[in-house]
Amino acid sequence: MIDGLIAANTILSPNAGYALLFAFGVLWVGLGVWWGRQAKSYDGFAVAGRNVGLALGTATAVATWITSNTTMLAPQFALQLGIWGALTYSTASFGLFAFAPMSGRIRQLMPHGYTAVEFVHRRYGQLGAIPFLIISLFYAMTWLISMAMAGGKLLNVLSGIPYEVGMTVVLGVCVLYTLFGGMYAVIGTDFIQSLIILVGLVVVAIAVLLHVDISDVHSKLQTERPMLLSVMFPAALMAVFNNMLFGFGEIFHSNVWWSRAFAMRDGVGPKAYALGGLLWLPVPIVAGFLGLAAPALGIGISQPDIAGPLVAATLLGTGGALFVFVIVFCSLASSIDSLLAATSDLMVNDIFERAAGKTMADATKRKLSVLSILILGLIAWSVAWANIGTLATVLFFAGPMVGSCIWPIVGGLYFSRPSPVAAGAAMVAGSSLGLVAYFTIGWFVASLVGATVSGIVFGLITWIVPDSFEFDQLSRQEPGPADGSPTTTEGCVS
């Protein structure tokens, strides 16, 4: 039977929330400063000296992909879409599995690369690079904003800390330690965060199962909300494929994942991403169960994206709220820092340096990285302050755009025939019609439409007007720094 609900006053007090926020803030900033000592050059700051080993490589993949979207959107999907919703978010693991061999290919083709946009620019020229850069920056900002929103909502629902205060502190802490340590700080903290997240989720899952009778949840759902148990729920079925393609598009195009491919040692990427996918796969299923149980438990949910934390905290009281706080805070930090570091690389290498028309000095690029991180943090903070929409509606607005990048990336990495026109047209057409679907049908089909339209356009133009690209062009190293200083080889990160 379902245990009686824990009284609301047993959830964390504001003072406890502030104490936890301060403790973790000091911890992450301190670790960022400590790990950042190794970043003695821009190469170290941006890609950790290209020497990341399997343990840290796997940990950073897991921690970055266990975002607040995993711990908060997975329950939202289950609450709104039922059993398919609980499984929907787990399909994002397929993106990690697919990117595993691609990461090795990327490292082989561009051993000195920094960004995904750099690849697209060399492979497709301006026709492909311009829409891809716009999509990459837009997606990065929507993800970053959704993470900041999640931080504010989490602290508010668990401890009563005002949304604006929680959002500001979470974002500010991540900006600070990323400024100090770059990719070294990001990957180092990811290792600790991944361990905390995985252990915490196991503890919360066991505790919830001890408080909830699954058969009771099933019978109440069957009586009160039978559609949530239906395997033929149309919106849920579409959401499964939509989310799967969104996951492919997210990982294939995002510099968050490309920067890690460049940072890992030769041969490490495929293993790290495959292991990361295996470790990540059950996480959204566990989190999703919380949302599925909410209606049966009689817990009022004012905002669907806070269902998971609210259910766990209400069932388990102070202990549950504490574990949920730690898990989601770590998942937030591991994603926000990755976005800040990877997107600053885009701004430095693909905007500032190209606008300058020459290769910048190492010290100049490092300063521009700091400036870029501050700009990104300020933009995300200003937009997230309004707290408009749920996490799903904010994040999946970029769905058709990232979905439209799948085929140009895969085709460009493995085949010589795709042309700049094919890549550019596919991204524009897929994004445009996908956004139409987003507004006229719903977020749960936008990525599916964007990826499908993009694939058709990309295939047709490649067939009608084929190219003949020479992949050797991608491995040619760019000229050295403008001041003639040699590239520093950073220490090995295991």
Image (cartoon, rainbow, N blue to C red):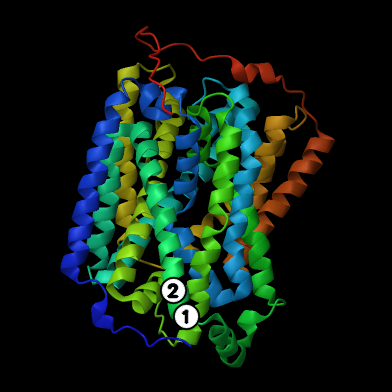
Residue at image x 57%, y 91%? 224
Three-letter amino acid code of the residue under disc 2: Val
| Residue 199, horizontal then vertical, whole percent | 41, 55
Outermost residue, left side: 15
Q: Identify whether 341 is placed above or below 226.
A: above
Three-letter amino acid code of the residue under disc 1: Val
Circle 2 sits in a helix, a strand or a loop, which is it?
helix
Which class describes the residues within 10 Å of circle 2: few (<14), some (14-19), or many (20+)? many
| Residue 203, horizontal then vertical, whole percent | 41, 63
Q: Are marks 1 and 2 in contact (CB under 8 Å)?
A: yes
Q: Nearer the viewer, residue 449 or 313?
A: 313
The answer to whether residue 91 is visible is yes
Q: Which residue is mark 1?
A: 212
Q: CA distance from mark 1 to mark 2?
A: 6 Å
Outermost residue, right side: 464
Q: Where the C terminus falls, by quadrant?
A: top left
Q: Which residue is mark 2?
A: 208
Q: Quadrant of residue 100?
A: top right
Residue at image x 23%, y 49%? 25
Residue at image x 37%, y 74%? 310
Question: Residue 388: which disc?
Answer: none
